[in-house]
Image (cartoon, helix red, strand yellow):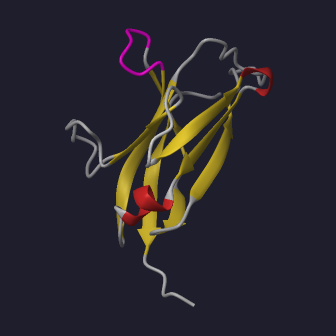
Amino acid sequence: MPTLPNQLNTTSAAGSQWATTYTLQNDDGTLMNIVGKSFEFVVRPSTTDVAEPALVAVNSTTATAQGYITVTPSTSTVQVVLSPTATALLGQSAYPYSLWMDPGLTDATDLVVGTFFSSLVAAA
């Protein structure tokens, strides 16, 4: 991966399932060794907000009503899935998000940051 954190904005319809997969690479383009690593994806009201729990938070340890993270070390991929319950909390707005590797540990690394744009969509 180039200089961390990487910047990537994303969008979702409020109340829908959202999923994306990140392929993690070293500076030289080789796959990052993520064996034994934990991950957390958080969406917060602002970049300075540190309240727990975050507005939306999912991790690679436990699936919750808000979603889950699947880690595949052989391909250095991290798939983040947010449930309709989680995206419904976002309504029509834009929030900062981060994907953390080893959150809460001394080597915690913010891999990806950006703005999570959420929009309201009329039912069919």
Query: Quick one: which residue is furthest to the top in this view?
Result: 106
- Is residue 57 or residue 118 the one in the foreground? 57
47 on left or right of 94: left
* Residue that appears at 43% across and 54% down: 115
> Quick check: 27 above or below 57?
above
Q: Looking at this rendering, what residue extends furthest in the bottom direction? A: 124
Q: Measured from the top left, where is residue 88 in percent x and y?
A: 40, 65
Out of 38 and 113, give the one closest to the viewer.
Answer: 38
**Residue 18: quadrant of the picture:** bottom right
| Rendered-image quadrant of the C terminus | bottom right
The residue located at (39%, 12%) in the rendering is 105
Vertical placement of residue 60 versus 37, above or below: below
Horizontal arrangement in the rendering, residue 88 relative to residue 18 (left or right): left
> Can you give x and y, in whole percent of width and height, for residue 63 in the image?
51, 37
Majority secondary structure of magenta residues: loop
Which residue is depicted at the point 48% across and 87% down? 122
In the picture, which quadrant includes the N terminus?
A: top right
Q: Is residue 47 above or below residue 85?
A: above
Answer yes or no: is residue 85 visible: yes
Count of picture labels:
0
What x and y, as percent, mark residue 15? 46, 68
Instruction: Out of 59 and 78, give the one closest to the viewer.
Output: 59
Q: Is residue 42 visible?
A: no
Q: Residue at x 19, y 38 (%)?
A: 51
**79 with respect to 95 (left or right):** right
Is residue 87 located in the magenta-colored stretch of the structure? no
Q: Which residues are magenta?
A: 102-107
Residue 77, horizontal then vertical, whole percent: 71, 32
